[in-house]
Image (cartoon, rainbow, N blue to C red):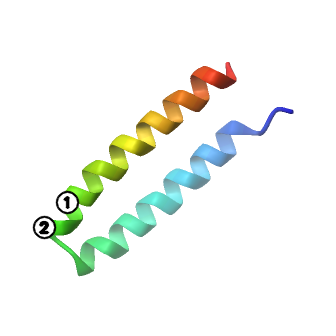
């Protein structure tokens, strides 16, 4: 069972960036802390799935 990993990652990144831009207009300071936390989790998740997948 192999999922098309690249389209999933690209779609996730695009959705992620859109959400970030929308949230950034509403929240500044709180958003920055949230941004770093989500970014770290996102990168770790991507690396984990890439290592697990390949």
Residue located 60% across and 31% down the image? 49
Instruction: For mark 2, give the secondary structure.
Output: helix
Instruction: For mark 1, give the secondary structure.
Output: helix
- The alpha-carbon separation of the residues under discs 2 and 1 comes to 5 Å
Residue furthest toward the right?
1
| Quarter residue 43 falls in | top left
Note whether 43 is above or below 22 in the view shown. above
Residue nearest the observer in this picture, 20 or 33? 33
Left or right placement of residue 54 versus residue 15 in this view: right
Residue located 63% across and 23% down the image? 52
The answer to the question of whether label 2 and label 1 lie on touching residues, with beta carbons closer than 8 A, is: yes
Left or right placement of residue 7 versus residue 22 in this view: right
Q: Mark 1: few, some, or many residues within 10 Å (few <14, many ≥20)?
A: few
Residue furthest toward the left?
29
Residue located 52% across and 62% down the image? 15
Q: Position of residue 9 (x, y in %)?
A: 59, 44
Residue nearest the observer in this picture, 42 or 4? 42
Q: Position of residue 42 (x, y in %)?
A: 44, 44
Residue furthest toward the bottom?
26
Q: Mark 2: few, some, or many residues within 10 Å (few <14, many ≥20)?
A: few
Q: Position of residue 44 (x, y in %)?
A: 43, 34
Residue under pointer 2: 29
Q: Quadrant of the C terminus?
A: top right
Left or right placement of residue 35 versus residue 32 in this view: right
Residue under pointer 1: 32
Left or right placement of residue 27 versus residue 46 in this view: left
| Quarter residue 20 falls in | bottom left
Residue located 23% across and 66% down the image? 31
Q: Quadrant of the N terminus?
A: top right
Note whether 7 is above or below 16 in the view shown. above
């Amino acid at each position: 069972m192999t999922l098309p990993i690249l389209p999933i990652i690209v779609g996730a990144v695009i959705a992620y960036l859109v959400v970030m831009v929308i949230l950034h207009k509403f929240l500044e300071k709180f958003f920055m802390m949230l941004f770093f936390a989500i970014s770290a989790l996102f990168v770790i998740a991507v690396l984990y799935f890439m290592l697990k997948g390949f």
